[in-house]
Amino acid sequence: MNNKIKWLLKKNISFIKPIAKKLVSKNQKKYIYTWRIMLGKVSFKELFLNLEFFRDKYPGTFLSAKLYRKMFLKSDVTFAYNYIYPFDPLKIRFLPEGITALVSITPDYSCVLKSDLRRIKQEITFHNEEDKFVDTVYGIIDAVEAKANKIKKRQSCNEREHFLSAFFPEILYRDCISLDEAIQKILFYNALFWQARHWHNGLGRLDLILNQYYIRDVELGIETYESAKRRLKDFCLLLGYHTKFKSPGLIGDTGQYILLGGIDKEGNNVENDITYMFLEIFTEIKVPDPKLIFRVNDKTSTEIWNLCIKCLSNGCGSPLFMNETLIMNNMVEFGYEREDVWNLGTSACWEPLVIGKSSCQNNPFKSIVLCDSLYRVLKKGRDFYSFQSLLLAVKNDLAIEVPLVIEDLNYDYSPLMSLFDSDCLNKGKDFSHKGTKYMYQGVQLLGLPNLVNSLLNIKKYVFDRHLITLDDCLNAIANNYEGYEDLRLLFLGTSDEKFGSTSAEVLDVCNQLIECVSHAIEPLRANGNAVKFGLSSPAYLFQSVGSPATLDGRKSGEPYAVHISPISSSIDINEILRFAGRLNYPYNCLNGNVVDFIIPLSYQKQPEKLVSIIRDAFSHGLFQLQLNMLDRQVLVDAKSHPEKYPDLVVRVWGFSAYFNDLPEEYKDNLIARAGIYETA
């Protein structure tokens, strides 16, 4: 082929490409994207032979339930770690255009374990206008029963698998009679939730839920502490078996959270053998998925605190800590009822909801990049006579911009989730379509530390010291600090007046910005319900791409700060925790407010000191906390020699992952942050 022909082909291809893109529908793009993603996870042969799409054209109808049945029956079943798990990642349900997936939900597994499908069919409230819902529920029950019967008929030479198959379909029609049955029933339905495309579905309060079955087994001599612990270890390992398929983005970000601790319905603290088992398991096996969240209060025992820190010290990144008293009080003020918030859970990484009564969608909107408001204000070229007048202009811009990200969304239906929500069954309405008691949506703020430090730099160097002008600041942003390196170094310099400092001035700026967003969001509604917001966003890397520089010394495209975290080596763990405890969290600032800090390995030698610091912080108003215990030199070496560190686990935005599975930019971000915090 001569060069001229090659040139013509190349030109034609470049001409055809944009036309082809326009001809391909959004759904076709989704199929292509799924193929591309899956090719990175399985071989082409396996993909070609087993990948199958189930296009659900009519979600929420009997036809949709029939599609579920077909998908369930075609889906393969995994037997691993001594349990059956009917999730097949190569059988994928697709939604119509304009339908938003229903994700980040924690079902109430106490209801799941006690559920009886025959009784559910009998007790559905019949409304003539809601026959569609009743038909759909009947259809989904038929789909679940069909899957259970297929498991029953599976031929297996494995004695254990044969034993478990005998549980089906009987356990669908009664409460479980043993811990072993309870674990299998949870795994069965959990797999179906994933198959239904409900990504990021959590496991809930398993120490509260499973304890009764464990106690009964011990009394009957069926289980001991160690045998029950082995079963729970297998349970955790099986949940993590499909991590790469359950992660729509970064590997490890599955939302598979197990909640421990906290109060029960009567106000008693939940600390039992199951609590201890899970903490011990995660200390021993050091896996990134699933993850632990611990609900703490002033009655959380010292022994439990010590176990939590020991678990963290192994590097697994679990547990994340939640101040349940503060969070529950805010939830009540926001609109959740006091009688419900005892069953506080999370929708995914950290966003609170009520387990069993919520279809809350806490991450449906793009994060609000706070620094953009300052840039917009500076570009208008106004003269500001004082720092307060500039701050007021930034707040006014935020008040205009915040509502622009909130919108009504058309969510997917979930007849499967509806089975285990009494409100849905009584009302005759679907889980995500006015069936649940609560369906609030949430938005997240991005780059609060960057904006605060930018404003403090302007105050110090423009208004107080008169060293530079606002035009200098604007030019530095516009030129990405090229020709303004001295200004960048000035802005990056350590100072007592930085985000995370307990200085009254720093806290005042932070709280003014938080209050501004709170007032801007207060009158807004999404799908008819109030909206909440949070100070923690997972978008600190992917929303920073192409972003302008900021006046804290951050260059264009560099990551924004992570959650409520200092970006200065002058602030240590003690100070950032005191700072976070003094922030004002308005009632609607409820969508995740996480302090994220990397602490040096030296704390492994003095865990009692770390326990004391954290307990004190929670007693003074800390909202949520996640910690990495990492050595920067180990991270640097792991990046250069990944083969030496196949099991190195790190905490990312709200989940844990193997370091080797992370994209390079996330590795670099962790290394950079570890370097800052090591010198704090």
Image (spheres, helix red, strand yellow):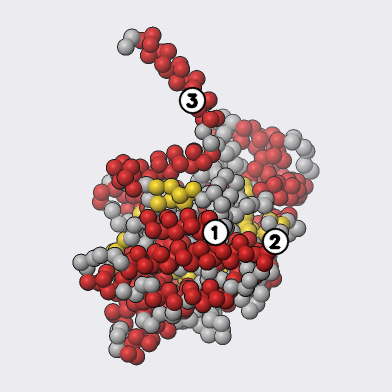
Q: Residue at x 56, y 52 (%)?
A: 58
- 606 is higher (above) or lower (below) than 516: below
- Point out the frontmost of discs 3 and 2: 3
Q: Which residue is mark 3?
A: 17
The dot on residue 661 is none
Q: Residue at x 33, y 66 (%)?
A: 151
Distance CA(mark 3)–CA(mark 2): 44 Å
Amino acid at the residue labelled 2: Ala
Q: Is 620 or 133 nearer to us in this picture?
A: 133
Distance CA(mark 1)–CA(mark 2): 31 Å
Q: Secondary structure at mark 1?
A: helix
Q: Secondary structure at mark 3?
A: helix
Amino acid at the residue labelled 3: Lys
Q: Which residue is mark 1?
A: 62
Tell me which label, 3 or 2, sits earlier in the chain. 3
Locate the N terminus by quadrant. top left
Q: Which residue is mark 2?
A: 530
| Outermost residue, bottom side | 219
Residue 85 in picture, x, y percent from top left = 35, 64
Q: Is 639 or 294 nearer to us in this picture?
A: 294
**Mark 3 Cα shell of 10 Å, populated few (<14), some (14-19), many (≥20):** few
In this picture, residue 585 sits left or right of residue 153: right
Q: Quadrant of residue 155?
A: bottom left
